[in-house]
Image: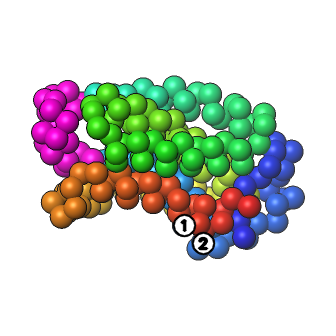
Amino acid sequence: MTEISAGPEDTPQASGAVLTAGRLFLLASLAALGALATNIMLPAFPSIAADLDVSTRQMSWTLSSFFVVFALGQLCVGPLADAFGRAPFVIGGLALFILGSILCAIAPSFEILLAGRAVQALGACATSVLARAVARDLFQGPALTRALALVMIAMAAAPGFSPALGTSMTYLLGWRSLFALTAMAGWIPVGGRIVS
C-alpha cells in the first residue's frame, strides 16, 4: 500500500518506500488530472455551447476560470501541505475534483458549469502540486529522479491523448460523459489505495 506522508516530519528515509509501477502510476494519475480535465473538453465546446445556449466564444470562460483558480490555488496548497501534511490536501483535492466534475456533468446552466470548473480546478491544483511533493517525500536518489520524470511525462502526455478521447466520447455519449470520466479519473488514486 502506498502511503502519503502524514506530516512535514516524514522523510524519505523514514518512509522506506520502494519504487513500484503501482506507485508510479498513482503519482502520475494525480499529476495528470488538471491537464486531462482541461483538454478533454475542448472538442465538446460546440456541443456544450449549443446545449447551454451560449456562444462558442463564451466557452473560453470555462478555461479562464479553471486556470485562474488552478494558479492561485497552487500558491496556497504547497505551503499549507508543508505545514500540516500532505494527506489532508491530497484527499481534499481529490474530493473537490470529483465534486467539481460531477457538478459540471449535471450542470443545467452555463453559470453552474463555470462554478463546477472552478471547484474542479481547486482540486486539481492540489493533486498536481502534491504529486511531486509526495514523490520527494517517498523516494530519494535515482528512484526520485525516475518518479519525477514519469510524473512530468504524465503531465505532458495528458494534453496529447485527451482531445481525441474527448472527441470520441462527445460523439458517442454526449459532452456530459466527459465530466463523468474525469470524476472517475479522480477516483483512481483512491481506488488504488494511494491514500491509507
Question: Is residue 163 something one can see in this rendering?
Answer: no
Disc 1 target residue: 25
Between residue 136 and residue 93, name the one nearer to us. 93
Between residue 163 and residue 196, name the one nearer to us. 196
In the picture shown, does residue 7 fall above or below 12? above
Q: Residue shown at 20%/47% (left/top)?
A: 44
* Placement of the N terminus among the 4 image quadrants: bottom right
Please, what secondary structure does the residue beneath circle 2 have?
Answer: helix
**Span of residues in magenta:** 41-60
Q: Main secondary structure of the magenta part?
A: helix
Q: Is residue 163 on the magenta stretch? A: no
Position of 13 compared to 152: left or right? Answer: right
Q: Position of residue 113 (x, y in %)?
A: 33, 35
Q: Residue shown at 66%/55% (left/top)?
A: 135
Amino acid type assigned to the residue bearing label 2 in the image: Gly
Disc 2 target residue: 22
Specify the quadrant of the image occupied by residue 138: bottom right
CA gap between label 2 and label 1 equals 5 Å
